[in-house]
Image (cartoon, rainbow, N blue to C red):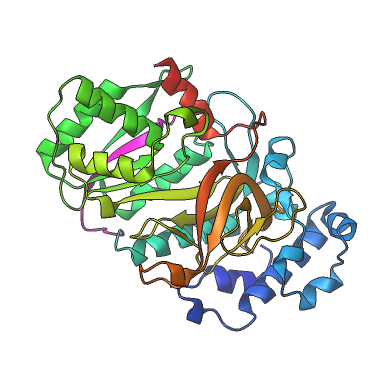
């Protein structure tokens, strides 16, 4: 196991949104350490730095991490980039039943860091309830054999924060693929309402919206799930963008038809290429935890955009040692806002998502899942 004390210390911080808990230069030292690690342990990374005007020695005093050349997340769809610690690490993929896949490796250290972040965020919002059994509706893929799909792996992990009484999947395994089962989901929700245990809903929002529409079309009576129920979404709408509705409209419909309060409906942003979790606050803003920084770039010249100006969404975080994904640029357009512009009580910056950039052939889990939804 490689020793990365500065990176490990940053990723182990217990308060995910308290900027005062981060010591001066702690983030800079952690980023320098992980970047130097990849210079030594990831073939080609030192040349990548040099091609962008940096050397390993420059990393020591660097405090502007926008200067660190990022890798486009879409690049991981064509290349498996590994450090020495990623050779035999857990491999997760980004796509569903078809299309291009991002293949990422997570060594034990990187996976533990990402999972610790999720655990701290769940504790921050009082969602870690080990004494309260729940029923789960997972709007994602039912596992068939070993779990390698990033969304399924995440959903399985999220079930650790409250004991599982029953787990129902919206995308049922057929042995040769997956099939969306809206009527099975409706039946499960009805039985959950009768059982009276809190319900936790995780996964793709497009599937729950389809279920809610099916309930209305079938004159299914509105349900009242227990007050401690929770809905956390991830993956977006992707190829079903034409059907996408505003999140507040979705949350209002969930409250009306399922009885889950709007305040307990949250969206989550993450990717297999960047596993740091971003979860909406009570005001439905994606605040940046202390484990990462957000850099929004002008898509024309890659210049860093100021607060309030949209651009390509980028991240830097020292959490990952198995792949040089500590500085990445996503294919999403976003705007960064100062923490002071949100009245939820958190002081960290937050970002607003505007959708995907361009119309490339790149695909993700949600895009493949959207095809299943379309076939239904």
Q: Foreground residue, 146 or 373?
A: 373
Q: Is residue 78 left or right of residue 156?
A: right
Quadrant into which the N terminus falls: bottom right
Q: Is residue 74 magenta?
A: no
Q: Residue at x 71, y 67 (%)?
A: 65
Number of numbered discs overlaid on the protein picture: 0
Judge whether residue 144 can be spotted in this image: no
In magenta stretch: residue 137: yes
**Does residue 264 lie above or below 342 as drawn?**
above
Residue at 26% in and 43% down: 252
Which residue in the rendered view is the most extreme toward the front?
309
Residue 268, how many percent across, how many down? 44, 50
Horizontal relation, residue 250 to residue 303: left or right: left
Res. 375 image quadrant = top left
Residue 40 image point, x, y percent: 82, 62
Against 140, residue 29 (above or below) is below
Quarter of the rendering occupied by the C terminus: top left
Across and down, in percent, residue 171 comes to 39, 26
Choose top left, top right, bottom left or bottom right for residue 196: top left
Identify the image quadrant of residue 90: top right
**For residue 371, above or below residue 132:** above
The residue closer to the viewer here, 116 or 205, is 205
On screen, 35 above or below 227? below
Q: Considering depth in this image, is 106 or 363 the residue closer to the camera? A: 363
Q: In percent of the image, x 23 and y 27: which residue is there?
A: 186
x, y (%) of residue 144?
Answer: 45, 27
Asked if residue 265 shows in the view, the reply is yes
Q: Which residues are magenta?
A: 128-144
């Amino acid at each position: 196991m490689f020793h990365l004390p500065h990176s490990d210390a940053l990723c182990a911080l217990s308060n995910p949104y308290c900027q005062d808990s981060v010591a001066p230069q702690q983030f800079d030292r952690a980023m320098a350490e992980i970047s130097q690690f990849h210079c030594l342990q990831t073939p080609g990374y030192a040349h990548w730095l040099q091609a962008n005007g940096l050397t390993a020695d420059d990393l020591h005093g660097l405090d502007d991490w926008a200067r660190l050349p990022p890798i486009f997340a879409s690049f991981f769809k064509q290349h498996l980039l590994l450090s020495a610690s990623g050779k035999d690490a857990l491999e997760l993929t980004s796509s569903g039943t078809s299309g291009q896949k991002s293949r990422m490796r997570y060594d034990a250290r990187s996976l533990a860091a990402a999972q610790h972040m999720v655990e701290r965020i769940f504790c921050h919002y009082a969602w870690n309830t080990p004494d309260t059994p729940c029923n789960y509706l997972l709007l994602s893929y039912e596992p068939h054999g070993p779990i390698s799909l990033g969304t399924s792996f995440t959903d399985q992990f999220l079930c650790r924060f409250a004991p599982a009484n029953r787990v129902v999947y919206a995308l049922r395994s057929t042995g040769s693929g997956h099939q969306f089962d809206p009527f099975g989901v409706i039946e499960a929700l009805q039985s959950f309402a009768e059982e009276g245990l809190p319900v936790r809903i995780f996964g793709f929002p497009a599937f729950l919206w389809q279920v809610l529409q099916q309930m209305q079309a079938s004159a299914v009576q509105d349900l009242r799930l227990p007050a401690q129920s929770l809905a956390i979404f991830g993956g977006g709408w992707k190829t079903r963008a034409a059907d996408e509705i505003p999140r507040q409209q979705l949350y209002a419909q969930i409250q009306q038809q399922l009885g889950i309060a709007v305040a307990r409906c949250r969206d989550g942003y993450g990717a297999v290429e960047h596993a740091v979790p971003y979860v909406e606050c009570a005001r439905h803003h994606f605040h940046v935890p202390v484990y990462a920084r957000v850099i929004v770039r002008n898509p024309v010249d890659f210049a860093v955009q100021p607060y309030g100006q949209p651009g390509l969404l980028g991240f830097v975080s020292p959490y990952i040692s198995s792949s040089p994904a500590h500085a990445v640029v996503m294919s999403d357009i976003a705007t960064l806002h100062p923490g002071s512009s949100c009245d939820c009580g958190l002081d960290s910056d937050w970002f607003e998502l505007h959708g995907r950039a361009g119309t490339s052939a790149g695909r993700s889990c949600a895009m493949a899942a959207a095809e299943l939804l379309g076939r239904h």
